[in-house]
Amino acid sequence: MTASRPFLKTCGVAAAFVFSALALPAQAQQKMDHAGHNAAAASASASPSTKAFQQSDEKMMKDMAVAYTGDADRDFVAHMIPHHQGAVAMAEVQLKYGKDPELRKMAEEIVKAQQTEIAFMKTWQARNGVK
């Protein structure tokens, strides 16, 4: 049993190193501007679905670049609408190009749910004099 303790300690140190290494890119990513993040990955040889996903990602990131007002409710809705629209666009790409029946069903559900939430948020904005 004592022989396994050094092994466990080594595994624990290795795991801590891996987790800390994984956390660094996540922290750096939180501080960077994501607009056009996938643009460099686009190429003439990209599949039609990849190009469609990249276009929807770029539009969503551009549309989410809205100035904050300091009002949590207004800011939440102003950023969530384009976020949800991006989810709808990505789900539509899945429906156009995807083949897996479970993912297609999920994409259909995403479109329905996100469109309902977008409508709610736009109604909220109109009721509260936003936009």
Image (cartoon, rainbow, N blue to C red):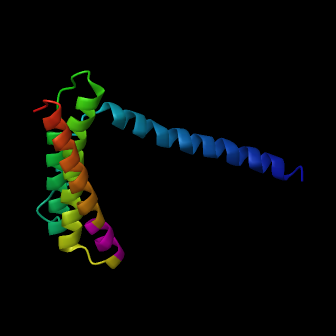
Is 16 in front, or is 65? 65
Is 121 in front, or is 16? 121
Picture coordinates of residue 98, whole percent (x, y): 25, 73
The residue that appears at 14% across and 54% down in the rendered structure is 55
The residue that appears at 14% across and 66% down in the rendered structure is 45
Figure label count: 0
Picture coordinates of residue 49, whole percent (x, y): 18, 66
Visible in this render: residue 113?
Answer: yes
The residue that appears at 15% across and 61% down in the rendered structure is 52
Looking at the image, residue 5 lies above or below residue 24: below
Looking at the image, residue 43 lies above or below residue 121: below
**Which picture quadrant has residue 26?**
top left
Is 116 in front, or is 87? 116
The furthest residue to the top: 70
Is 111 in front, or is 53? 111
The residue that appears at 23% across and 68% down in the rendered structure is 94
Picture coordinates of residue 4, whole percent (x, y): 82, 52
Magenta-tinted stretch: 102-108
The furthest residue to the front: 127
